Image (cartoon, grey):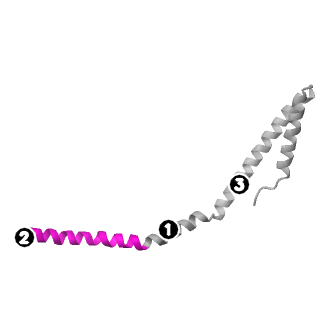
Amino acid sequence: MNPLRLLALVSAALALQGCLAKAAVNVVTLPVRAVSAGVDAATTSQSEADEKRGREIRKREERIGKLEREYNRQLERCRIGDDEACDEAQALKAEWEALIGEEPEA
């Protein structure tokens, strides 16, 4: 056998050992990483839950504020004789009262 060919074969064999070992480690740890990622995706930390609840409360409060402003505009139009505005004001007030009485999710 040619000495250069033998040297190339030995070098290739040594180089491939690292690749094979890394591949074996990846194959062995893959199920553990997959389960871990699934558990992380399926669970919500307390801080994430708090952030979500805070966002929901802010959105609710923003909606309440918009309803109040629109209600006041419609009420003013109702006072000057606009019957449609009176109906709209009543609908806005009902939605506003429903939101006020609703407790945000814990």
- Crowding around mark 3 (Cα neighbors within 10 Å: few <14, some 14 to 19, many 20+) is some
Query: Which circle, 1 or 3, is nearer the viewer?
Result: 1
Can you tell which quarter of the image residue 27 is in?
Answer: bottom left
Q: Amino acid at mark 2?
A: Asn
Location of the C terminus by quadrant is: bottom right
Give x and y (percent) for residue 44. Answer: 63, 63
Q: Does residue 65 show up magenta in the picture?
A: no
* Residue at image coords 89%, 34%: 87
| Mark 3 vs mark 2, CA separation in Å | 74 Å
The reply, left or right, for residue 75 in relation to residue 11 is: right
Q: Pick out the residue farthest to the front.
A: 1
Q: Amino acid at mark 3?
A: Gly
Q: Amino acid at mark 1?
A: Ala
Span colored in magenta = 1-28
* Residue at image coords 71%, 56%: 53
Q: On residue 2, which mark appears?
A: 2
Indicate which disc, 1 or 3, sits on the residue closer to the N terminus: 1
Q: Does residue 8 show up magenta in the picture?
A: yes
* Residue at image coords 66%, 64%: 46
Location of the N terminus by quadrant is: bottom left
Query: Which circle, 3 or 2, is nearer the viewer?
Result: 2
